[in-house]
Image (spheres, helix red, strand yellow):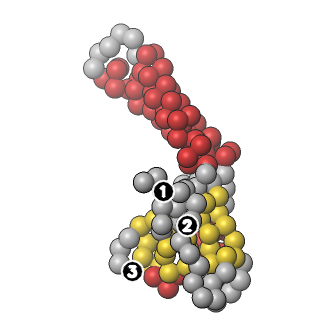
Amino acid sequence: MTRSMTPDSPLGDGETILTSFRADRATYIQANTWLAAGAMAGGMLILWLVGNPHVWTGAIGGFAAVAVRAFYMMSEELSVRWDLTNQRLLGPMGRAIPLSAIKNFNTLGNMVQLVTHSGDKHLIKYQHDPAHIIATLKHVAAGGTP
């Protein structure tokens, strides 16, 4: 069974969607550009350390690996949506996190990490302004509106 990359959990009584968070295309491209640069440097370093005279091929291999993955995953990653309701954060593949269950909010580059009291971790990836999302989530969890 294929699960949707958008929330499919039914809304409860009195629950309304306040806002949605979608992956940002420019942020996705930027993140994968930095990943490719790191993979290129790493590939060249490894080949240099093992004494390979064709160090430059590490750059090609690192770039190709990240570029193929980024191209292949782009449509799926950019279709992800999280919906914030007045009671829960609804995510892809049936995720439904009560706002009261969220213990910590962390920023990991362009991602927002949510950690629940039970230790579950969820990522809202490829966000242009993760700090704004965290502020919105905290405000709604405290009873406010976005």
Q: Secondary structure at mark 1?
A: loop
Name the residue nearer the viewer: 83 or 111.
83
At 56% from the left and 75% from the top, the residue drawn is 10
- The disc labelled 3 sits on which kind of residue? His
Based on the displayed image, in which of its 4 quarters is residue 57 positioned?
Answer: top left
* Position above or below: 12 against 60: below
Q: Report x, y in % for residue 70.
A: 54, 37
Which residue in the protein does label 2 denote?
A: 8
Q: Report x, y in % for residue 53.
A: 36, 10
Left of 144 or right of it: where is 106?
left
Which residue in the protein does label 3 denote?
A: 117
At 30% from the left and 23% from the top, the residue drawn is 49
| CB within 8 Å, label 2 to label 1 | yes
Name the residue nearer the viewer: 119 or 77.
77
- The disc labelled 1 sits on which kind of residue? Arg
Mark 1 Cα shell of 10 Å, populated few (<14), some (14-19), many (≥20): few
Q: Earlier in the sequence, mark 2 or mark 1?
A: 1
| CB within 8 Å, label 3 to label 1 | no
**Furthest residue toward front:** 1
Q: Secondary structure at mark 3?
A: loop
